[in-house]
Image (spheres, rainbow, N blue to C red):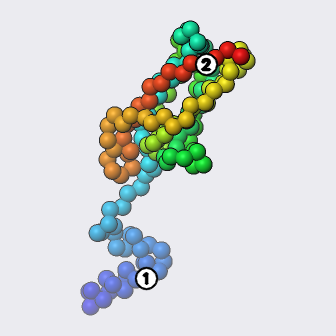
Amino acid sequence: MKNFLKSFGGLILTLLGFGTMATGCFPFRCEYGCPHADFRAEINVVDEQGKPLQGIRTVLRYRNEAGYDVPYYQSDTLYTSNMGLALFDGTVFSAPAYVDIVYEDLSGEYMSSDTYGLQPEQIHEGDKKWYGGSYALYYTKELKKK
């Protein structure tokens, strides 16, 4: 009788939408979270003589697959410092397989440019769950005068 009441109670709770509460997560693991990865990008932007360029808008666009028809899942806009460095150090939605970068001089002195298909280096492995690991990208771009 005890097993019948337990089963019947579980059925009623399941019909009311409390199935997980009635059965627990056993044998499955219940996890809640969001995929994420640590990412560091150091982009140096210089002119043709190797002099650092300040104030260059640098847009990093992340994608998980090869091919240029694949949509980006995240992008970040950075501006170069007086040392010509655009630095990003933070968390992205998912581990980036490829990074495309768009460079634009808002003063109009230098030509805009793009870099496609850069592959970040994996620094640390993820936990094979929500954390995708740690990645880094170091790149130097030379812009030409108009």
Name the residue rendered at 71%, 16% in the picture.
146
Q: Residue furthest left?
A: 2
Residue tagged 2: 143
Q: Earlier in the sequence, mark 1 or mark 2?
A: 1
Taking the image as drawn, is residue 55 in sight? no
Residue 13 position in % (x across, y down):
42, 78
Residue at image position (26%, 91%) is: 1
Q: Residue at x 31, y 82 (%)?
A: 6
**Residue tagged 1:** 12
Label 1: few (<14), some (14–19) or many (≥20) C-alpha neighbours in 10 Å = few
The structure residue drawn at horizontal position 50% and vertical position 46%, both measured from the top left corner, is 66
Task: Tell me: 47 left or right of 1.
Answer: right
Three-letter amino acid code at the position of disc 2: Leu
Q: Kindly identify the amino acid type of the residue bearing the numbered disc 1.
A: Ile
Label 2 element class: loop
Q: Is residue 40 above or below residue 6?
A: above
* Quadrant of residue 81 within the rendered picture: top right
Q: Separation of disc 1 and disc 2 at Cα?
A: 68 Å
Q: Nearer the viewer, residue 68 or 52?
A: 68
Quadrant of the image occupied by residue 110: top right
Report helix, strand or loop for mark 1: helix
Q: Residue furthest bottom?
A: 1
- Measured as percent of width and height from the top left, residue 145 is found at 67, 14
Callout 2 environment at 10 Å: few (<14), some (14 to 19), or many (20+)? many
Closer to the observer: label 1 or label 2?
2
Decide which of 132, 1 is in the foreground and name it.
Answer: 132
Q: Check contact, mark 1 vs mark 2: CB within 8 A.
A: no
